[in-house]
Amino acid sequence: MGIVDVVSVFCTLPRTRRHLKKRKQFQTVEMKMRIDCEGCERKVRKALEGMEGVSSVEVAPRQHKVTVAGYVDAGKVMRRLARRTGKRVEPWPYVPYDVVAHPYAPGAYDKKAPPGYVRNVVADPAAAPLARASSTEVRYTAAFSDENPNAACAVM
């Protein structure tokens, strides 16, 4: 046993990676929050721009939407925003109109949604059955589709 073996015993790296901190992923967090005036908008920006890991903050007061991009955790951002502003904050519940198969179904349509958006029934299992077509609806819509022009002849 030489000097190299003795030194290597004392200089080994730890086998566990417990001490290494897991890095956060870059993500975009969209939230719905009531924004009444320019003062509310300034308060939101001030609360979020000082947060560690935040790259950008976008506030759309007409849509009541706050978008935060950066290496952050969505839950921490929402808790901080609610605590600093004193207002209710919830995840953005809407998706673009084109994503949902039946946007005017009772589960998807929402009068409070901004223009071009409907409620996210794809992720919400409680409202999803209301926004899906039944088998008879699918059969009728497939019979009169542009992709199969001879199907209408079979019905008539």
Image (cartoon, rainbow, N blue to C red):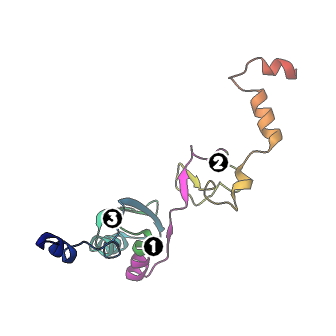
Query: In the orientation shown, which residue stands out farthest toward the front?
Result: 1
Q: Which residue is drawn at 52% across and 51% down?
A: 115
Q: Which of 4 and 48 is in front in this view?
A: 4
Q: What residue type is labelled 3?
A: Tyr
| Residue 5 relative to residue 112: left or right | left
Residue 22 % position (x, y):
35, 69
| SS category of the residue bearing label 1 | helix
Query: Mark 2 sits on what residue?
Result: 103
Residue 38 % position (x, y):
34, 69
Sequence order check: which comes first, mark 2 or mark 3? 3
Q: In this view, does 68 lie above or below 9?
A: above
Magenta highlight range: 79-101
- Residue 99, magenta (yes or no): yes
Q: What residue type is labelled 2?
A: Pro
Query: Mark 1 sits on what residue?
Result: 75
Q: Residue 99 has which mark?
A: none
Sequence order check: which comes first, mark 2 or mark 1? 1
Picture quadrant where residue 42 is located: bottom left
Q: Gap between marks 2 and 1, in whole Å?
A: 29 Å
Q: Is residue 14 above or below residue 101?
A: below
Q: Residue 71 has which mark?
A: 3
